[in-house]
Image (tube, helix red, strand yellow):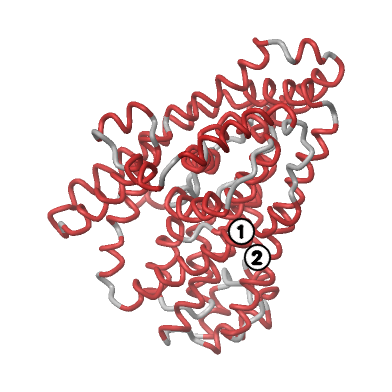
Amino acid sequence: MTTTTMAEAPIAPPAAKPWYKVLYIQVLIAIVLGAIVGWLWPQLATNEWIKALGDGFIKLIKMVIAPIIFCTVVSGIAHIQDAKKVGRIGVKALVYFEVVSTFALVIGLIIGNLVKPGAGFGGGAANEAAVANYAKQAAGQKSVDFVLHIIPDTVVGAFAQGEILQVLLFSVLFGFAVMSLGERGHTIRSFIDDAAHAVFGVISIVMRAAPIGAFGAMAYTIGKFGTGAILNLVGLIATFYVTAALFVFVVLGTIARLAGFSIFKFLAYIKDELLIVLGTSSSESALPSLMEKLERLGCSKSVVGLVVPTGYSFNLDGTNIYMTLATLFIAQALGYDLSFSQQATILVVAMLTSKGASGITGAGFITLAATLAVVDPRLVPGMAIVLGIDKFMSECRALTNLCGNGVACVIVAWWEGELDRDKLNANLSKQIDPTDMETAITTD
């Protein structure tokens, strides 16, 4: 009797934090204060101690790049085996994820090269000598030297020296090795997953210093480059939002149309989940309710149970767009002209580093750091430029990820022949409330 009473007792919702204790609000206040200090007192803003606030936070981020990359890449590859166990559904889901993620990365690169949001930021002239010197070094570097650089002398050395490309190589090899172990690799997969959660715990601690870092980075940026830099930063935000919208309405819209439904009606159907994500900046916050709605939409339980959770690691369209745009913005702002091969490297590296980056505050910034470190280590300090505005783009990343995973589930269910078309049309056309049990029973 006691057990039943406890189980039925309502759980009180957690008390809301005071507004001044919300990290997002703290970062916004820090950004505004930093911009004011940089505008009114540029000499103070360019002081080495102010600059150290932003640089120190970037170093804290860099500190956890290697372990995060190792854990997320190994975990992602190792769990491919889990997806294969369910047969065709898992394989189709993985194929869809990689194809659509590639589209997201390519769109980000195309828009970044066309719009050039970082051009004229103010760092180009200061870096002309460095660019010329780098060009000489690149001209004298042989392809074989680059290949040999990817291979670490020792695994420990790759982690100790922060050679992300070498860490990536070892992570990929180790991930496939664990995957080949099958059931015998269950223990080590669980350990890697737990280690990833622990390292993300470190990130959550580090992110508490984000307001301090954002203040220092914004003050120094405005103090050094002038208020015109704000226009470039606003331009990056606008470019990202427009690019994400193009991806959702054009790419996902086209895919949805091929499957016989409207992307606009689908977005209206999951509007509650979109609002949850908008408030939390995390697409995983809406995971349970999204899965329930997709089942009521006509997707089979087995497809929903596999595709949606897997998509949160393998299908991060918003994160992919962000990484390509932000990488190009930083390169343009610092005056570095990335070659075609370097931009192709962004595609490959971002495809790997984005795995497992959903749902964790600050994870998108970590994956950006890893991508920059591989493309060109000189770009990593440029993270301080976008640090102050990263929060403005985190919501859009999460919203795009949610839309992408929702559409992916419907598409895979349709592809597999496990989509109830009557339920789909009824819910999207009539906008039936999926929480209304009587309506759900009637449609069943």
Which quadrant of the structure image shows residue 107? Answer: bottom right
In depth, the one of 251 and 333 nearer the eye is 333
Asked if the residue at tag 2 contacts the one at tag 1, i.e. Cβ–Cβ closer than 8 Å, the answer is: yes
Residue 369's x, y, as percent? 52, 37
Residue 417's x, y, as percent? 42, 87
Describe the element under mark 1 as helix, strand or loop. Answer: helix
Which quadrant of the structure image shows residue 443? Answer: bottom right
Q: Which residue is mark 2?
A: 247
Q: Is residue 271 left or right of residue 191?
A: right
Q: Residue at x 77, y 31 (%)?
A: 122
**For mark 2, does the 10 Å Cα neighbourhood hold few (<14), some (14 to 19), or many (20 or more) residues?**
many
Q: Is residue 19 above or below residue 290?
A: above
In depth, the one of 16 and 99 nearer the eye is 99
Q: Is residue 179 above or below residue 128?
A: below
Q: Earlier in the sequence, mark 1 or mark 2?
A: 2
In depth, the one of 161 and 19 nearer the eye is 161
Label at residue 400: 1
Q: Of circles 1 and 2, which is in front?
A: 2
Q: Residue at x 55, y 35 (%)?
A: 136
Q: Residue at x 15, y 57 (%)?
A: 181
Going by the numbered disc 2, the residue's amino acid type is Phe
Describe the element under mark 2 as helix, strand or loop. Answer: helix
